[in-house]
Image (tube, rainbow, N blue to C red):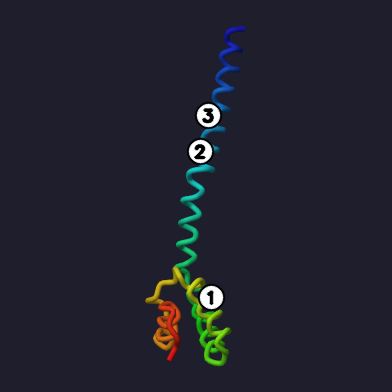
Amino acid sequence: MKEYLKWIIGGIVAVVAITALSIGIKYFAQPMSRSIDQKTFMESQQYVDGSVRDLSKYQVQYTVGDDATKAMIRSTVQHQFANFPSEKVPLHLQPFYSSMMSGGDLK
C-alpha cells in the first residue's frame, strides 16, 4: 500500500511540475518569441519592398491631392512609417519621406 501511495504522489507531483513549466513558458517565453518574430519580419525584404511601394503610392497621391488629402497622407505616412528604418528608404523617396516625417509640406 505504501509503495502505491509513493507512486501516486510522485505522479501528481510530476503532473503539477509539468503544468507549472508549461504555464511559465506560455507567459514568459512567448512574448520574447513574438518580439523576435516581429523584428525578423520588419527586417525582411518583403516588408521593406512593400513599405517602399506604399511610400511611393503615397507620394503620387500627395502630389495630386488637395490640402485635406495631403494632410491625411502626411498623417498616414507618419503613423505607418514611425518605426521604419530611414536608411532603407530609396534615394528618390528620401525628400518625400523626410518632409512627411517632419510634418512639413513637400516643396
Mark earlier in primary sequence (3, 1) = 3
Q: CA distance from mark 2 to mark 3?
A: 10 Å
Identify residue type, mark 3.
Ala
> Where 1 sits versus 23, above or below?
above
Identify residue type, mark 2.
Gly
Q: Quadrant of the C terminus?
A: bottom left
In percent of width and height, residue 94 lies at 40, 84
In percent of width and height, residue 97 lies at 43, 81
In percent of width and height, residue 48 lies at 48, 74
| Closer mark to the observer between disc 3 and disc 1 | 1
| Closer mark to the observer between disc 2 and disc 3 | 2
Q: Considering the numbered disc 2 on the image, is that residue within a helix, a strand or a loop? A: helix
Look at mark 1 in the image and give the residue it sits on: 76
At a point 58% along the width and 7% down the height, the residue shown is 2
Q: Quadrant of the N terminus?
A: top right
Mark earlier in primary sequence (2, 3) = 3
In percent of width and height, residue 67 lies at 55, 87
Give the class, few, some or many, for how many residues have Cα within 10 Å of label 3's Cα (few <14, many ≥20): few
- Answer yes or no: do the residues labelled 2 and 3 have beta carbons within 8 Å? no
Give the class, few, some or many, for how many residues have Cα within 10 Å of label 2's Cα (few <14, many ≥20): few
At a point 54% along the width and 89% down the height, the residue shown is 60
Q: What label does residue 17 carry, if any?
A: 3
- Front position in the image: 82 or 66: 66
